[in-house]
Amino acid sequence: MSVSPTGHVYLIGAGPGNPNLLTRKAEHLIRTADIILYDRLVNPFILQLAPPEVEIIDVGKKPYSRHIKQGEINEVLLDAAYKHQNVVRLKGGDPAIFGRVHEEVDILKAHQIPCEIVPGITTASAAAATLGVGLTCRNVSTSVTLTTGSFKGSEEQAIDIASLIDGGTLAIYMGIKRLHTIITQIYQQVGKDYPICAVFDVSYATQKVITGHLSDIEKKVHAEAPEDAPGILLIGDALEFADENTHIEIEAMSQYFGKECIVTGPREAAIEKAFEIYDAGGWCMIDPNTDEHYHQSQLDLIYRYMQVNDNTMIVKV
């Protein structure tokens, strides 16, 4: 049996942000990676699951601004595959949904580099779950369309609302900045005041839910939306049943709910405690004992995100 001269690349979905929504396979691959290339929206704690000595490389693209082009990402990915055995390409949500995974698979196959897509929970599913609704609902919504409000070169394009017209649910990723245009298009084509939810920071304790109808949602979003937080729009009759408080009813009883925490102590114990804090509605990173050798890229990540202030909770294990 021939042995590949390159490593194996895993294109992994990190889910919407809460590390408890990682698949077991995703966690295992991150923990055994030799190098990680990650997107901007990946929770930094998830990157801390990697072995301390492993290099992590930020290849994230920021919406509506110039950052890194896909061609550059492809070059970094190829370089990593030629130098390392287990290469993790970590993407937010599910890599097959607006994650440009096809372009990366194509370039890897062209260089005969073995690769595998590892699915993750997409933001639309996580948002619907926290609202206590289904994206489909018997006798209400029999289909769902996942679409994007962000187009190449920031050009204006109409959203595909065919399923909405047919009684389905519409999930629009990266559509907040085009909310007015989207509302205008739906009114022009349908003329119905659909229920709509804008959900920001999906799956985090900082999640913000704004519910309403097409007629009033724009004013609410302008008044209440958190600045620069990633958001998704869910539109359709199924959203009439959405409850913006569903995700906090149980978690709010926890001492960690809504808290920003730093967990100190032995690495594995700190990781387990961090998962517990996320499950209780908190946000945290680990600051393990300093006798372990950390790659400089991981130290940079820790210094970037672990900024202690008066509201920070230090949790020792």
Image: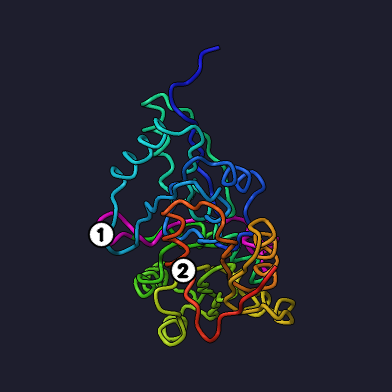
Disc on res. 126: none
Give the residue at x 56% y 74%: 207
Give the residue at x 42% y 67%: 304
Residue in the foreground of this view, choosing between 182 and 223: 223
Query: How much space separates mark 1 and mark 2, taking CA atoms?
Result: 22 Å
Residue 253 colored in magenta in the image: no
Vertically, is 120 above or below 273?
Answer: above
Q: Residues within 10 Å of mark 1 (few under 14, many from 20)?
A: few
Label 2: which residue? 305
| Left or right for 75, reference 55 | left
- Which x, y percent locates residue 55? 44, 47
Label 1 vs label 2, nearer the camera? 2
Give the residue at x 65% y 80%: 245
Q: Which residues make up the magenta segment?
A: 132-157
Disc on res. 66: 1
- Which x, y percent locates residue 106? 39, 33
- Which x, y percent locates residue 231? 47, 69
Residue 135 colored in magenta in the image: yes
| Left or right for 311, reference 147 | right
Q: Locate the N terminus by quadrant.
A: top right
- Which x, y percent locates residue 272? 69, 60
Quarter of the figure with residue 46: bottom right
Marks 1 and 2 close (CB-CB < 8 Å): no
> Dot 2 lies on which element?
helix
Residue in the foreground of this view, choosing between 217 and 34: 34
Q: Amino acid at mark 1?
A: Arg
Q: Amino acid at mark 2?
A: Tyr
Q: Locate the C terminus by quadrant.
A: bottom right
Q: Residues within 10 Å of mark 2 (few under 14, many from 20)?
A: few
